[in-house]
């Protein structure tokens, strides 16, 4: 008689705890955003907008042009995704559709292990191994380039991309595959003409999440991109150094006087970065909702 | 009761995942709770230990990365001679040390540049009046890849290289290669010193800045790693941080002057043009243990300075 009573009590506590934890996540995000706003908004009054969105970032001399940093982050991140997308989707297709059962059981945990490599290790690897390779094979003046950063970032966003894309493929009903094969399509045709298009929105979500992962990455990028705040507008910019927003914040935040214009400017970069990742994640969420609305998959 | 349901289905892959998910979730929750408990315990422990440590006071010494090895060597030697002394040394950069001094969280701030007037004002606004001590001298060495045939540059040439006016080694007597500029991050004292005294040639009104193509490296190691492996690179760093596998350039004040390699002798007699004093700042006139420590640094401690590649005061 007593047993079910106590059980319900335990259940209630755990449920309440999980609920509090769940809601506190939202609370923390809100608080962080408020903190960012409080520390960063003064910049927009202290620094004229022409300076703030100018082309020169020399914070020690009151030049706070964030444009090279924004474009630097964009260049590195987009290149990383361009590299990671075909690799990631191909891997997901292989793992989900082609690989035999034992290979899948082996590959999936391996891919998840990839995500666990600390970024500073990848950064060091990039600095000592990939950077010299990039310089020698591509003939760039230095190996510390946007491209090197993009390679490392592509590698780092792959686990996210593969896992989410694989889930999307997994959600395609078996009847689609059966129908494709029954109509006389080969396995290859079924995969590329039926399964992958059906999982398209999930793959878009995967790309968005990979993008969000890549744009926020700091340590590895700081170690391999050279951190030169030049405007990446020329054609060869991909093979020249860039400075990203995250690297700028990480490199400079430790040593700025609290409350100074520079300090506020770094938080303003934080706001810009936050808005960019927020938009990316929003886009990812929208594609998920869209998928639900269509009432098809998932 | 719902939990047991999926078990009854011999698993399709999706079901499999559902079964696996539950124990994992519980495990994660436990871990989270454990770590929270540990954090709480940690906080309690910390406050207890700091209370216990109060009688033997620790001298907090923080700042310049250029000075950090020297400051550590000093602290170790001094604590060996005075077993009751406690000195904790951390790096982070001159700006970090000075910021900590302004906020009143350190006893001695190390800096490879003098405090700026606005920093002194900020400290005074917090009721702290910083006192300056020159504790050693440092020379900034200009380094290139060992295979680079260039042996020496004038200050004007270095300035032109770092502002981007000279972009090829050919223009200063080297091979036909692009020049890759390396610098420390903009909050490093070495950066500010190099900008003011080399790029701007000591002219305070000069508008010259580092070329936007300059690679800003987060550490001395970043610079030496790139200089070691890239024949296009030119970098600068404290003489104490130059490793034998980099080539140090001789520097001339102007085209007519002799080219001088940095060394303890040439810095002390003033013939090497890029050298600077290194500072320690205390919050107000030092007393007690801090004064004893600084007095020791300025006398016996100077013997350690050349061992770390810096230049002693006398």
Image: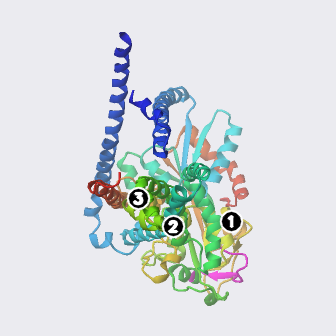
For image coordinates 61% across by 60% down, the residue present is A124
Nearest to the observer: residue A110 or residue B201: A110
- Give the foreground label among 1 and 2: 2
Disc 3 crowd rating (10 Å Cα; few below 14, some 14-19, many 20+) is some
User: Magenta stretch containing residue B12, yes or no?
Assistant: no
Query: In x, y percent, where is residue B218?
Result: 54, 62
Label 1 chain ID: B
Name the residue carrying label 1.
B242
> Which chain is home to disc 3?
A
Q: Tell me which residue sits at (61%, 90%) in the image.
A: B171
Q: Is residue B146 magenta?
A: yes
Residues indicated by labels 1 and 2 sit on the same polypeptide chain: no
Mark before the other along the chain sequence, 2 or 3: 3
Answer with left or right where residue A259 lies relative to residue A224: left
Q: Are marks 2 and 3 on the same chain?
A: yes
The residue labelled by disc 2 is: A188
Q: Is A67 situated above or below A117?
A: below
Say whether residue A282 is left or right of residue A188: left
Boundaries of the magenta span? B141-156
Residue placed most toward the observer, B204 or A270:
A270
Report which residue position mark 3 lands on: A176
Nearest the camera: B33 or B206? Answer: B33
* CB contact under 8 Å: marks 1 and 2: no
Disc 3/disc 1 C-alpha distance (Å): 65 Å
Residue at 54 percent of width and 50 percent of height: A112
State whether discs 3 and 1 lie on one chain: no
Q: Secondary structure at mark 2?
A: helix
């Amino acid at each position: 008689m007593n047993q079910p009573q106590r059980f319900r009590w335990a259940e209630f506590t755990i449920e309440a705890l999980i609920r509090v934890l769940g809601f506190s996540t939202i609370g923390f995000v809100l608080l962080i955003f408020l903190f960012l706003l409080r520390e960063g908004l003064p910049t927009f009054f202290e620094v004229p907008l022409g300076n703030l969105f100018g082309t020169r970032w020399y914070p020690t001399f009151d030049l706070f042009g964030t444009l090279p940093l924004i474009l630097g982050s964009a260049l590195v991140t987009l290149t990383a995704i361009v590299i990671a997308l075909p690799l990631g989707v191909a891997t997901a297709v292989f793992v989900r559709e082609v690989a035999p059962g034992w290979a899948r059981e082996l590959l999936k945990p391996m891919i998840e292990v990839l995500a666990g490599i600390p970024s500073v290790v990848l950064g060091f690897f990039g600095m000592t191994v990939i950077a010299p390779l990039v310089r020698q094979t591509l003939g760039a003046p230095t190996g510390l380039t946007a491209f090197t950063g993009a390679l490392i970032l592509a590698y780092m966003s792959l686990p996210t991309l593969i896992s989410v894309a694989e889930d999307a493929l997994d959600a395609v009903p078996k009847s689609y595959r059966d129908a494709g094969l029954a109509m006389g399509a080969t396995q290859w045709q079924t995969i590329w003409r039926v399964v992958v298009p059906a999982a398209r929105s999930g793959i878009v979500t995967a790309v968005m999440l990979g993008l969000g992962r890549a744009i926020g990455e700091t340590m590895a990028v700081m170690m391999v991109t050279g951190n030169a705040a030049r405007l990446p507008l020329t054609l060869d910019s991909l093979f020249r150094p860039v400075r990203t927003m995250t690297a700028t914040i990480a490199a400079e935040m430790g040593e700025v006087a609290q409350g100074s214009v520079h300090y506020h400017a770094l938080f303003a970069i934080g706001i810009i970065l936050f808005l960019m990742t927020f938009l990316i994640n929003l886009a990812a969420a929208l594609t998920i909702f869209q998928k639900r609305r269509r009432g098809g998959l998932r | 009761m719902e939990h047991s349901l999926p078990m009854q289905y011999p698993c399709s892959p999706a079901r499999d995942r559902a079964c696996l998910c539950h124990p994992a979730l519980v495990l994660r929750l436990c871990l989270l709770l454990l770590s929270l408990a540990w954090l709480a315990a940690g906080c309690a422990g910390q406050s207890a230990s700091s209370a216990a440590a109060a009688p033997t006071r620790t001298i907090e010494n923080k700042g310049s990365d250029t000075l950090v090895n020297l400051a550590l060597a000093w602290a170790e030697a001094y604590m060996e001679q005075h077993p009751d002394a406690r000195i904790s040394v951390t790096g982070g950069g001159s700006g970090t040390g000075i910021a900590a001094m302004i906020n009143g969280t350190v006893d001695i701030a190390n800096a490879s540049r003098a405090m700026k007037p606005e920093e002194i004002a900020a400290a005074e606004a917090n009721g702290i009046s910083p006192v300056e001590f020159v504790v050693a001298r440092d020379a900034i060495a200009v380094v290139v890849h060992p295979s680079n045939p260039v042996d020496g540059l004038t200050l004007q040439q270095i300035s032109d290289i770092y502002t981007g006016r000279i972009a090829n080694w050919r223009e200063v007597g080297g091979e036909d290669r692009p020049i890759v500029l390396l610098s420390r991050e903009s909050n490093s004292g070495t950066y500010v010193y190099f900008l003011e005294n080399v790029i701007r040639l000591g002219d305070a009104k000069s508008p010259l800045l580092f070329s936007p193509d300059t690679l800003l490296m987060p550490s001395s190691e970043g610079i030496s790693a790139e200089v070691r492996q890239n024949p296009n690179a030119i970098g600068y760093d404290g003489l104490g941080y130059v490793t034998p596998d980099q080539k140090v350039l001789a520097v001339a004040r102007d085209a007519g002057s002799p080219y001088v390699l940095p060394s303890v002798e040439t810095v002390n007699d003033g013939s090497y043009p890029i050298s600077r004093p290194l500072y320690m700042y205390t919050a107000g006139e030092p007393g007690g243990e801090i004064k004893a420590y600084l007095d020791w640094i300025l006398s016996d401690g100077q013997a350690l300075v050349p061992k770390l590649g810096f230049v002693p005061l006398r």
